[in-house]
Image: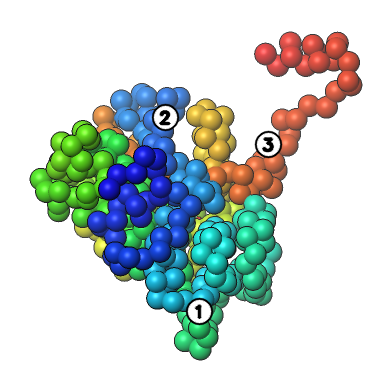
Amino acid sequence: MKKAHYTGLIDRYRDVLPLAADCRVISLCEGDTPLIECHNIKQANERDIKLFLKFEGLNPTGSFKDRGMTVAVTQAVTEGSQAIICASTGNTSASAAAYAARAGIKAFVLIPDGKIAMGKLAQAMMHGASIIQIRGNFDDGMRLVKEVANEAPVNIVNSINPYRLQGQKTAAYEIAEALGQSPDFHCIPVGNAGNISAHWTGYAELAASSGKHVTKACGFCNGDCQFTGKSSISNRPKMLGYQAAGAAPFIKGSMIDNPDTVATAIRIGHPQSWDLAQAAVKESGGWFNSFTDEEILATQKLLATKEGVFCEPASATSVTGALHDMEVGNIQNGSTVVCTVTGHGLKDPDIAIKQSATEMLTIDAELDSVKRAILNNI
Ligand SMILES: *Cc1c(COP(=O)(O)O)cnc(C)c1O
């Protein structure tokens, strides 16, 4: 049954999600995020490359985590769970806190002491989560969450929860639906490695269902959509996973113990979806690469100043990698490229202000000074 307005990704993609027919859907109308075509990126323009940003920062709590959380919390409630728990670099805790509030259950979040962006902490606090700061990093938190879930009645909503990845795969469906096919390359930041795995699942499912009905409720299969009732998606993208140089276990080829990067959302040394992500990259013919904090922040600034898209540092990693791979020719001229922009820039105002503060001008409150400031800078 088609609703008059968009009501979230579970309603839209129900047919491809493993939820009970009569479940109580816990949703904040997540998903349906914009796919923004870049106009002002010279590396793409010069090479006739169509470069798109899938702006996941426009989900209800400002990151793609909401896609997974709506499905994970809906399932937790279906199972009768009264409490959820996660380890988080910030965005998972913000999302878990919001969906737990919506569901009327309790959220416990373990965050690394002092290493969480201000906006994310504010969200977890406002939504009423129980916040537990640990003297350790995300990987320590993840280990503790897995241990405590064996001894206390809590449901883990990190991406080791398979319902999270099921929800997150819907981003691939949306992209393919918007483009009429899968892109040639899909670029994505990699931290715990759940999202790259989820996207690959989505693209692979679509390609496998080519020529068949995909879902009843989505744009693929209603008579009023461009696909006239059947999925025509037969191609799959190469999956390109990009990390921060200080937190790049996939480049090293093994886990690392003291990850460090300004991109706190991907400050992870022991990715939980290691095997799935390796398989996604290998099966798709893609690759991993890593970039320095300076390169990542420069791209964050570039997107904000050239395209009007303000993302958090971790999110800029996908575009940093895309630009690099265009320049060196790994991404061929004429390709279609989608970069996941994972989280909103307002999550981490401190970093944004720090790298832009020198641009601020202070003048006397008088007309002449304002006029001079304009004429000197136009
Ligand atoms: C969680 C997160 C990531 C990393 O995603 P994984 O699934 O852990 O690889 C990247 N960017 C942002 C903004 C995130 O919140």
Q: Is residue 59 left or right of residue 225?
A: right
Q: CA distance from mark 1 to mark 2?
A: 43 Å
Q: Is residue 138 in view? A: no
Give the residue drawn at x 41%, y 37%: 34
Residue 272 image-quadrant placement: bottom left
Whether residue 167 is situated above or below residue 7 in the rendered picture: below
Give the residue drawn at x 53%, y 30%: 308
Q: CA distance from mark 2 to mark 3?
A: 22 Å
Mark 3 residue crowding within 10 angstroms, few (<14) / some (14–19) / many (20+): few
Residue 321 image-quadrant placement: top left
Q: Callout 3, which amino acid?
A: Ser
Q: Which residue is mark 3?
A: 356
Q: Position of residue 142 (x, y in %)?
A: 51, 74
- Upstream in the sequence, badge 1 or badge 3? 1
Q: Nearer the viewer, mark 2 or mark 3?
A: 2
Judging depth in this view, the residue of 146 and 285 nearest the camera is: 146
Q: Is residue 306 left or right of residue 112?
A: left
Give the residue drawn at x 48%, y 52%: 28
Q: Position of residue 247 (x, y in %)?
A: 50, 61
Q: Nearer the viewer, mark 1 or mark 2?
A: 1
Mark 2 residue crowding within 10 angstroms, few (<14) / some (14–19) / many (20+): some
Q: Callout 1, which amino acid?
A: Val
Whether residue 232 is situated above or below residue 112 in the rendered picture: above
Give the residue drawn at x 35%, y 55%: 10
Q: How many marks?
A: 3
- Upstream in the sequence, badge 2 or badge 3? 2
On residue 64, the disc is: none
Q: For the residue labelled by badge 1, is the local secondary structure a helix, a strand or a loop?
A: loop
Q: Which residue is mark 1?
A: 154
Residue 100 image-quadrant placement: bottom right
Whether residue 111 is situated above or below residue 358 in the rendered picture: below
Whether residue 362 is situated above or below residue 326 in the rendered picture: above
